Image: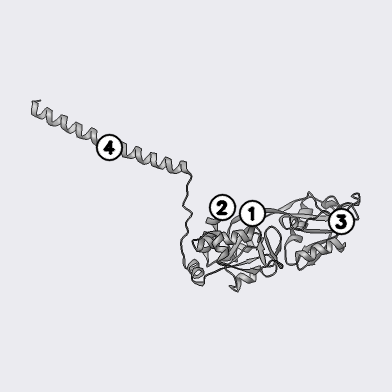
Amino acid sequence: MNNMKFRRLFALMLVLVFAVSMLTGCSSSKDEADSKDAASGEKDYSIEITDDIQAIIDRGQLIVGVKTDVPGFGYYDKETKEYSGKEIDLSYQIAAKIFDTTVDEAKSQNLVEFVQATVENRSTLLVEDTVDLVIATFTITDERKEMFAFSDSYYSDYIGIMVKKSKADTESLGSDAITSITNLDGKNVGVAQSADTRTHMLAYIDQNDYEISPRFMNFATYPELYKALKKGEIDAFAVDTSILNGYLDDSLTILPDRFSEQKYGAAANKSDEGLVKAVNVVIEENNY
């Protein structure tokens, strides 16, 4: 090989080595950048402004069906005329995301209109397009998912039973001692009208082979159930423990029995997929 050919070959090798080093360097830089992004833990929580969300923006308010008689979740104080609870907070967070503002501004600008939702009217509010969302201790079930679009679950609960304390407590208004579901044979158990509590309770009794037959009594509202228990018209008040906790006082106790997991979700009409996706973003971003 003459000197001219050797110099050309050597120059070509240098070019190839330089090119490989550049590619390796770029790949390394990209990997380092990706690693830094992963390490930072930052995630994009923006939402897509779909047609259903744009309709809410154009209206100027998000309309949400909420409970008004469940302290801690959805409660309306008639004296202060204010709503409070976990589901109220979630509603404002969703509105803040839709209108690209803060939660405080969503409250001060009245970006959420609340509509009273009950066990009986929750589905009707959606079917008749009275509200955009129902966020009202609404349990996600396969049957309901056939009718509505549900968000991810923002709260998980179980059905429980509340009774008066035992007569052994001298400060209690209780009568007969009821310490578990097995003491409810022939007792009057109050449940919310149109709720599926009775069905779940009977299934739990059957699964455990408890030889008991409670008598179920339906009431329209939770305050009515609470008053009936206090007056002795019913022996037990059965519903989700999150609801029971809102009515618990010194004369009452919640039994240790828990059954039928209840996963709460925000419900919308199936055509409002963009809205449900936005709700899921809010749920994830706020670690529900």
Tell me if label 4 and label 3 are in contact, CB under 8 Å.
Answer: no
Q: In the picture, which quadrant includes the N terminus?
A: top left
Q: Which residue is mark 3?
A: 185
Q: Which residue type does callout 4 highlight?
A: Met
Residue 57 showing in the rendered view = yes
Q: Earlier in the sequence, mark 2 or mark 1?
A: 1
Q: Which residue is mark 2?
A: 286
Q: Earlier in the sequence, mark 2 or mark 3?
A: 3
Q: Residue at x 91, y 54 (%)?
A: 176
Find numbered disc 1 in the image and state the secondary structure of the residue it sits on.
strand
Reply above or below: 260 against 78.
above
Q: CA distance from mark 4 to mark 1?
A: 51 Å
Q: Which residue is mark 4?
A: 22
Q: Earlier in the sequence, mark 2 or mark 4?
A: 4
Q: Is residue 29 left or right of residue 132?
A: left
Q: Which residue type does callout 1 highlight?
A: Tyr
Foreground label between 2 and 3: 2
Residue 140 showing in the rendered view = no
Reply above or below: 4 against 49.
above
Q: Nearer the viewer, residue 182 or 34?
A: 34
Q: Where is residue 234 shown, x and y percent of the image?
A: 85, 62
Q: Earlier in the sequence, mark 3 or mark 1?
A: 1
Q: Earlier in the sequence, mark 4 or mark 3?
A: 4
Q: Which residue type does callout 3 highlight?
A: Asp
Q: CA distance from mark 2 to mark 1?
A: 12 Å
Mark 4 crowdedness (10 Å alpha carbons): few <14, some 14-19, many ≥20: few
Q: CA distance from mark 2 to mark 4?
A: 42 Å
Q: Residue at x 55, y 63 (%)?
A: 106
Residue 234's disc is none
